Image (spheres, helix red, strand yellow):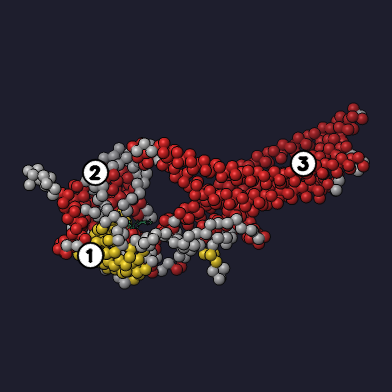
C-alpha cells in the first residue's frame, strides 16, 4: 500500500524511492495535503481496516447510524414532552400524556449510551486488529532492509516515529471517517428535527463549526512537527531509561556508581522535553481557544436569534425548549464532523512518514528478480579489491581487500583493533554489499544469487552473538530455524562445541531456559555461552563457516580442544576465523594480516614469521608477554 510520496525521491515514472542507506534521510515536513492525496489516503486506510475486520467495521457503522437515529428521536421526544408538560399545566387530567414521551426519551437515551459503550469495545478490538496488520508490515521491512540502515541514526529516528506514532494512524483515519459519517448522519437527523422548529437556525449552526475546522488544521501541523522534532530526544530518554533498568547494564551501573550521573542526564533530557512540550501545548491551546471562542460566539448569536424568534412568536415555548436541546446536539455533531476531518488530516501527515519507511521494504529486491539459488557447495571463494565505507564514516573500513578461500581450507584473519576484520567477515557473509570490488563463488558474483539461499550456505558466529532467553535446544536449533528441531543433531552440535556436558547437567537438561528472566531459567558463564553459539553454528551445517573471535571467552583447555578438533568437526567445510591469539592462528592454512582496511601480508604462520613484517611484530609482542623473565616455567627456565 502506498500512502503518499512525501519526503521520498520520485523517479520519472512516478515510483516512490526511499533514500539509500548511505544517504541522509530527508527530515519529514508537514506537507499541505491535496484533496486527491486525502482521498487516496482514506481509501488505503479503509481497505486496511476492512481487511483487518470487516464485521467489526460494519458493526461500528451500524451502531453509528443507530445513534444518529436515536439522537433525532430524542429531539422529537423532548418537544412532545414539553408540549405535554404545558398541557398538564393547563389541565391536570392530561398527566397521562406525559408517560409516552418520557418513556421514549428514556429509551432513546439508554439506547444511545449502550450503543456508545458498545462502539468503544468494538473500536478497541478493531484497533488491535489493524495494529497487528501494520506491525506485520513494519516488521517485514525492519527485518528485510539492508543491514547498513541500522548504522544510520535517521533510520532509527524514523523507526521510532513509526512505532510510536504511525502504526495506529490508518485505524485513526478510518475512525475519523466513521466519526465524520456518524456525525453527519446524526447532524442530518437532528438538523431535520430542528428545521421543523425553525429552518433559520440550521445554516448558522454549520457556520459555527468553521472556526474549529480552520484552527484544527493548524493544530495538526503543529502536532506532527513536534513529533518529528522530539524523536531524537525521546530516543535518548528511552536509552537512558534502559541503562538504568537493563539487566546487563545493572552490574556496571552499580560497579561504577553511575546511577546519579545517569539520573542527572535523564532529568536534563526530560526537562528539555517538558520545556518543548509546554511551548507546544501553549501553542496548541491558543489555537484550540481561538477555535472554540469562534464557535461559542456563533452559538451565542444563534441563541439570540432564537430569543428573537420567540419574541416574534415564530417559535412556541415547547419548540424553543426542543430547539435549545437540538442546538446543543447539533453543535456537537458539527464539531464531530470537523473533528473527523482533523483526525484524517493529522493522521495523513504521520502516514506520509510511514509511507517512506514502508518504501524501504519495497526497495528490496522483488522475488522474481532475486536470481538463482546459491550453489550448495563451492570450489573457491575469491574476494577482489573490496572497498566498503560505513554510512557517515570519513574513511573506508575496507580499502581494496583481496583474499582467496578454497574449499576445505581453514583461513585466519588477524590484525589490530579496527583494522577491518569483522567488516570483511560481514562482506564475505553477504551481509553488506561492497561499494566496489566483488566476492565471487567459483567466479559468480554473490550479488547474482538469491540472498536467502546464500545465507543458508553460510554460518556466522559474531563476537556479540545473541544470547536468546530460550531453552538450550532452541538456542542451538535457531541455527536452522526453518527446519523442525532435530534433538540428536542438537546434541551432536553441542558435543562438537564442547557444550554437551554442562547443558546435559542443567536442571531440565536441554529444556532449561538459558536466562534467569524466566521462571526456572538458568544463567550460563561467558565461555559456556560461547560454546552454545558455536554449537548453533555447527547445527547450521553450512559449507562456509565464519567465526569472529570464537575462543575469546574460552578457557585454555576449551580453546585448545576447539582448534585441535576443528578440522574433524568441520568435516571438509571451509572456515574463516578471526583471532587475536597467535596460538590458535598458527594452525590455519593461510593467514591474512589486515592493517587500516588493507591486506598487508598473507601466508602460513611460518612464512609470515620469516618475512619479519607486521605479523611477526604482533606475534613477537604476544610471545614476549609469555616469556617474561621468571614466568616461563615453574622452575624458572
Ligand atoms: N557499525 C559501524 N559504523 C561505522 N563504523 C564502523 C562500524 N563498525 C566498525 N566501524 C569502523 O570500521 C573500522 C573497522 O572495524 P572492524 O569492526 O571491521 O574492525 P576489527 O578489525 O574487526 O576490530 P576488532 O579487532 O576491534 O574487532 C573501524 O575503524 C571501526 O571504527
Which mark lies nearer to you, 1 or 2?
1
Q: Nearer the viewer, mark 3 or mark 2?
A: 3
Q: Residue at x 58, y 47 (%)?
A: 127
Q: Which residue is mark 3?
A: 328
Q: Where's residue 430, x and y in %?
A: 36, 62
Residue nearest the viewer, comparing 229 with 80: 229
Q: Residue at x 65, y 60 (%)?
A: 34
> Residue at label 2?
501
The answer to whether 23 appears left or right of 185 in the picture is left
* Residue identified by numbered label 1: 601
Q: Residues within 10 Å of mark 3 (few under 14, many from 20)?
A: few
Residue 233 lies left or right of residue 379; in this view the side is right
Pinpoint residue 564: horizontal percent, then vertical percent: 18, 54
Dot placed on the residue nearer the N-terminal end, 3 or 1: 3
Residue 580 occupies which quadrant of the picture? bottom left
Q: Is residue 334 above or below residue 388?
A: above
Query: What is the x, y in percent for residue 212?
Result: 71, 48
Q: CA distance from mark 3 to mark 2?
A: 77 Å
Crowd rating for badge 2 (residues with CA inside 10 Å; few <14, some 14–19, many 20+)? few
Say whether disc 3 or disc 2 marks the residue closer to the N-terminus.
3
Mark 1 residue crowding within 10 angstroms, few (<14) / some (14–19) / many (20+): some
Which image quadrant is residue 314 in?
A: top right
Amino acid at each position: 500500500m502506498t500512502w503518499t510520496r512525501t519526503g521520498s525521491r520520485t523517479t520519472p515514472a512516478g515510483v516512490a524511492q526511499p533514500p539509500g542507506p548511505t544517504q541522509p534521510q530527508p527530515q519529514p515536513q508537514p506537507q499541505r495535503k491535496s484533496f486527491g492525496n486525502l482521498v487516496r489516503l482514506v481509501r488505503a486506510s479503509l481497505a486496511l481496516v476492512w481487511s483487518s475486520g470487516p464485521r467489526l467495521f460494519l458493526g461500528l457503522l451500524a451502531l453509528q447510524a443507530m445513534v444518529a437515529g436515536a439522537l433525532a428521536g430524542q429531539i422529537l421526544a423532548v418537544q412532545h414532552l414539553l408540549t405535554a408538560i404545558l398541557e398538564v399545566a393547563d389541565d391536570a387530567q392530561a398527566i397521562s400524556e406525559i408517560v409516552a414521551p418520557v418513556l421514549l426519551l428514556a429509551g432513546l437515551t439508554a439506547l444511545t449510551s449502550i450503543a456508545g459503550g458498545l462502539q468503544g469495545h468494538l473500536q478497541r478490538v478493531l484497533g488491535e486488529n489493524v495494529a497487528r496488520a501494520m506491525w506485520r508490515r513494519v516488521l517485514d521491512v525492519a527485518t528485510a532492509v539492508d543491514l547498513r540502515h541500522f548504522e544510520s541514526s535517521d533510520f532509527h529516528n524514523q523507526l521510532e516515529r513509526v512505532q510510536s506514532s504511525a502504526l495506529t494512524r490508518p485505524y485513526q483515519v478510518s475512525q475519523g471517517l466513521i466519526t465524520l459519517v456518524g456525525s453527519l448522519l446524526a447532524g442530518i437527523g437532528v438538523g431535520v428535527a430542528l428545521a421543523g422548529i425553525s429552518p433559520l437556525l440550521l445554516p448558522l449552526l454549520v457556520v459555527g463549526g468553521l472556526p474549529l475546522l480552520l484552527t484544527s488544521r493548524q493544530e495538526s501541523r503543529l502536532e506532527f512537527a513536534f513529533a518529528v522534532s522530539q524523536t531524537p530526544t525521546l530516543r535518548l530518554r528511552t536509552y537512558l531509561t534502559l541503562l538504568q533498568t537493563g539487566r546487563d547494564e545493572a552490574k556496571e551501573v552499580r560497579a561504577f556508581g553511575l546511577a546519579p550521573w545517569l539520573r542527572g542526564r535523564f532529568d536534563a533530557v526530560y526537562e528539555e522535553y517538558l520545556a518543548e512540550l509546554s511551548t507546544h501545548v501553549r501553542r496548541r491551546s491558543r489555537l484550540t481557544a481561538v477555535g472554540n471562542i469562534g464557535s461559542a460566539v456563533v452559538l451565542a448569536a444563534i441563541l439570540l436569534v432564537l430569543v428573537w424568534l420567540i419574541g416574534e412568536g415564530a417559535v412556541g415555548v415547547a419548540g424553543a425548549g426542543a430547539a435549545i436541546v437540538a442546538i446543543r446536539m447539533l453543535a456537537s455533531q458539527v464539531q464531530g464532523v470537523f473533528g473527523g476531518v482533523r483526525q484524517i488530516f493529522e493522521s495523513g501527515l504521520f502516514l506520509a512518514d510511514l509511507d517512506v519507511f514502508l518504501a524501504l521494504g519495497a526497495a528490496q529486491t522483488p522475488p522474481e528478480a532475486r536470481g538463482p539459488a546459491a550453489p550448495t557447495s563451492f570450489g573457491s571463494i575469491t574476494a577482489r579489491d573490496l572497498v566498503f565505507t560505513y554510512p557517515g564514516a570519513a574513511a573506508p573500513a575496507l580499502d581494496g581487500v583481496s583474499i582467496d578461500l578454497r574449499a576445505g581450507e581453514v583461513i585466519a584473519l588477524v590484525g589490530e583493533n579496527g583494522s577491518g576484520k569483522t567488516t570483511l567477515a560481514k562482506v564475505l557473509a553477504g551481509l553488506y554489499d561492497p561499494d566496489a570490488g566483488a566476492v565471487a563463488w567459483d567466479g559468480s558474483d554473490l550479488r547474482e544469487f538469491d540472498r536467502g539461499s546464500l545465507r543458508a550456505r553460510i554460518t556466522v558466529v559474531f563476537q556479540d552473538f545473541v544470547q536468546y532467553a530460550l531453552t538450550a535446544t532452541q538456542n542451538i536449533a535457531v541455527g536452522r530455524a526453518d527446519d523442525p528441531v532435530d534433538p540428536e543433531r542438537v546434541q551432536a552440535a553441542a558435543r562438537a562445541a564442547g557444550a554437551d556436558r554442562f547443558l546435559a547437567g542443567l536442571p531440565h537438561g536441554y529444556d532449561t531456559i538459558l536466562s534467569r528472566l524466566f521462571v526456572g531459567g538458568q544463567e550460563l558463564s561467558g565461555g559456556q555461552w560461547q560454546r552454545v553459539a558455536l554449537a548453533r553454528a555447527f547445527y547450521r551445517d553450512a559449507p562456509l563457516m565464519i567465526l569472529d573471535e570464537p575462543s575469546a571467552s574460552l578457557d585454555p583447555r576449551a580453546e585448545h580442544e576447539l582448534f585441535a578438533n576443528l578440522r574433524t568437526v568441520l568435516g571438509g567445510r571451509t572456515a574463516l576465523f578471526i583471532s587475536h591469539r597467535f596460538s590458535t592462528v598458527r594452525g590455519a592454512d593461510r593467514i591474512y594480516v589486515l592493517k587500516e582496511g588493507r591486506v598487508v601480508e598473507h601466508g602460513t604462520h611460518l612464512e609470515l614469521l620469516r618475512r619479519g613484517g607486521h605479523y611477526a611484530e604482533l606475534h613477537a609482542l604476544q610471545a614476549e608477554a609469555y616469556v617474561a623473565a621468571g614466568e616461563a616455567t615453574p622452575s624458572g627456565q
